[in-house]
Image: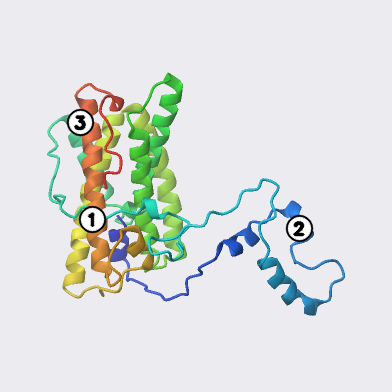
Amino acid sequence: MSALFMRQVSPRFFSAPVLNRTAEDVSTMLRPALCVRNFSGLAPGMPEEKKESSDVKQSNKAIDSYWGVAPSTVTKEDGSAWKWNCFRPWETYNADLSIDVKKHHNPVKFMDKFAYWTVQSLKVPTTLLFQTVAAVPGMVGGMLLHLKSLRKFEQSGGWIKALLEEAENERMHLMTFLELAKPQWYERALVIAVQGVFFNAYFLAYLASPKLAHRIVGYLEEEAVISYTEFLKDLDNGTMENVPAPAIAIDYWRLPANSTLRDVVMVIRADEAHHRDLNHYASDIQCQGHELKDAPAPIGYH
């Protein structure tokens, strides 16, 4: 889905410096207002020339919080500092590239055909749609299953976690491509508009028929796999430059240090193929008259 964004617009690669903030920097930014006298860092009447030295002293102070919650210190296996707050080392993984990226669920029943042609019709108004909605279904499904579990006092079979993992994985795809291309204001506006419409539409669809909702996502993921396959062709024929892989991608997918954009696209395509299988599987469970909780969820299935 992010592939459509990268291929649709002319890639605007940029080299803005990455701000690697330390725990002390973060603690200074998060210092509660009740614990400081003012936001300027200057005591009343302090001369302006002392501001710089005062700021330096404040940045070196430990967290001053009533709650006593301090940022954790995380390191890599080699002992070097872990610089990502959006995910941690134990959340990284090696992508399974052996998955069949050509699999397709043949729409035979009316529900399958409705889901398939719904996805196909969404490709007509704008291909940018797919880059904005990828992380929505897993979040909506996980949220509704969470509420159902509380409401019915029953376990979910692990499906809450599996769907939230999918949503987080899709979000990391977007975070990766944001290291390579910066969207313009109108693209951001489109994301907000489409996301708002799709979230509510998918929410209602999941309430009405979870098996239909999962089938739709299965077909969406099939289109994502196709898009990334085309993306790879563009990289191979030189239409797009095969730039070095972003640092966030190297750490998240445990890629070699000399990896390129093509390596990143390969692992993301594998992720999308796994999401395709998971959602078609979820729909099959319910089409056969069972509930999701009756079948153990493939947690960690990337």
Q: Position of residue 121 (x, y in %)?
A: 25, 46
Is residue 219 at all visible to an observer of this figure? no
- Total marks in image: 3
Q: Please tell me whether mark 1 sits on a helix, a strand or a loop.
A: helix
Marks 3,1: beta carbons within 8 A: no
Of 102 and 154, which appears nearest the observer? 154
Expressed as whole percent of the image width and height from the top left, the position of residue 177 reads: 36, 63
Identify the residue shown where x is 55% and y is 65%.
22
Q: Which residue is mark 2?
A: 36
Query: Where is residue 173 shown, x and y percent of the image?
Result: 34, 56
Going by the numbered disc 3, the residue's amino acid type is Asp
Structural crowding at the residue carrying mark 1, measured as other residues with C-alpha within 10 Å and reported as few (<14), some (14–19) or many (≥20): many
Vertical position of residue 79 compared to residue 64: above or below: below
Q: Please tell me which residue is depicted at 31% across the width and 69% down the height of the picture.
A: 245
Q: Nearer the viewer, mark 2 or mark 3?
A: 2
Rounded to the nearest whole Å, what is the CA distance between mark 1 and mark 2? 48 Å
Q: Residues within 10 Å of mark 3 (few under 14, many from 20)?
A: some
Within the image, what quadrant is residue 119 found in?
top left
Q: Which mark is residue 284?
A: 3
Q: Kindly identify the residue that appears in the image at 42 percent across and 67 percent down.
A: 182
Residue underneath mark 1? 269
